[in-house]
Amino acid sequence: MNNKKAKAKPVDKNAIIKAKDAVIKALDQNGNGTIDIEDIIVLAIKTPGVHITRANFLKKELFKNYPQEVIDKAIETTPAQAGIPSNEIDKIADEIIKFERNCVSGISAALGAPGGWAMAATIPADIVQYYGYTLRATQKLLYLYGFPEIDSDEEGLQLDSQTVNQIILCLGVMNGVAGANNAIKGMAKALAVGVEKKLLNTALTKGTFYPLVKAIAKWFGVKMTKTIFAGFFKKAIPIVGGVVGGGITFFSFKPCCFRLKNVLQDTVLSNPNHKSSAKEDEFVTSIIKGTVIDVDYDEIIPTDEDNDE
C-alpha cells in the first residue's frame, strides 16, 4: 500500500488567465475591457424579477393593514405623507431586507462550493444575481421611504444614465462610501421642495452629483476586480473559493442594506421632523444653480469594511 501523499497538480496559469478573460468578457457590457459597476447594474436589471414597480410594491405591502384611500395617497405622495407611522415602515423594511438576504444565501452557498477552474463560467451569473437582489432591496427601500419610481423602459430592462447614477449613489451608501449619505439626503430634499426633474437629471449626469458618482464608480471598479479575482493566482485554491473572499457573500448583504435604510429613515421625504444639515442644503443649492460639488477619489474610500451586523 502506498502511503505517500499525492502531489498537488501544478496550477495552469494559462488556464487561469483564460478563465479570468472569460469572466471579464461575460461581465463587460460597455466594451472597455474592465468590470465597472455600470456593467453590473445593466446586467442585474435585465434579470427577471429585479425591476420593482413602485405602485404594485406599495399596494402589496400596505393592503393588509391600510384602507385603499391610504394606499392611494402613499402611492401618489409618500408613505409618510399618507400617515403611515415610521415604525410600521421600518418593520416592512426589515422584512424586505430579511427576505432578500435569504435569497442571497443560496447564491453564497453556490459560491462556496468546490469546483476548480471549470466553475469560472458560473461566476458572472452568481455576481449578477447577488447585485440583482441588492437592486431589488434598493428599489423597495427607496419606495418605502418616499422616493419616486426608478425610471426605466416599460419592461424595466433599460435604465437611463441618471437612473444608473442614482443607483450608484445608493450603492455608495450601502458600502459606507464617504459623502454618499449627504448626497442621498440632499436629493431627497430637492425632490421634497419640488426641484425640477430636468435639474435633478442634469445634477446626476454632469452637475452636482457627478464627481461623487464617478469617484464611487471608480472605487467600485477596483473593489469588484479585487473581489472577483481574489484567489485567481493563489496556488491550489479553487476559483469560486477566491470569489467568496472578496465579500460577495450572504453576510455582507445585511449590513449594506441597513446602511441604506438608516440613511433613508431620516430625510425630508420620510421624516416630517427632519432637520436638514448644511451639507444637504449645499447639495440643493448646487442643483438649482447648476454647479458641481468637487470630490476626489481618495476622499470617498470607505473606512468601515464590516461584513456583518
Image (cartoon, helix red, strand yellow):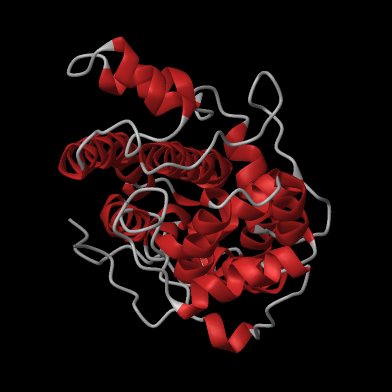
Q: Is residue 293 above or below residue 76?
A: below
Number of dots carrying numbers = 0
Relative image position of residue 155 (x, y in whole percent): 66, 19
Judge by depth and name the residue closer to the eye, 210 or 249: 210
Q: Residue at (68%, 78%) from the top-left corner? A: 293
Give the quadrant of residue 150: top right
Relative image position of residue 118 (x, y in whole percent): 53, 44
Q: Residue at (46%, 71%) from the top-left corner? A: 235
Relative image position of residue 121 (x, y in whole percent): 58, 41
Q: Is residue 202 above or below residue 96?
A: below
- From the viewer's perspective, is 240 left or right of 223? left
Judge by depth and name the residue closer to the eye, 125 or 242: 125
Q: Residue at (72%, 64%) from the top-left corner? A: 288
* Residue 4 visible in the snapshot: yes
The N terminus appears in which quarter of the rendering?
bottom left
The C terminus appears in which quarter of the rendering?
bottom left
Relative image position of residue 31 (x, y in whole percent): 83, 52
* Residue 231 visible in the snapshot: no
Give the quadrant of residue 233: bottom right
Q: Residue at (40%, 18%) from the top-left corner? A: 72
Judge by depth and name the residue closer to the eye, 117 or 175: 175
- From the viewer's perspective, is 275 left or right of 154? left
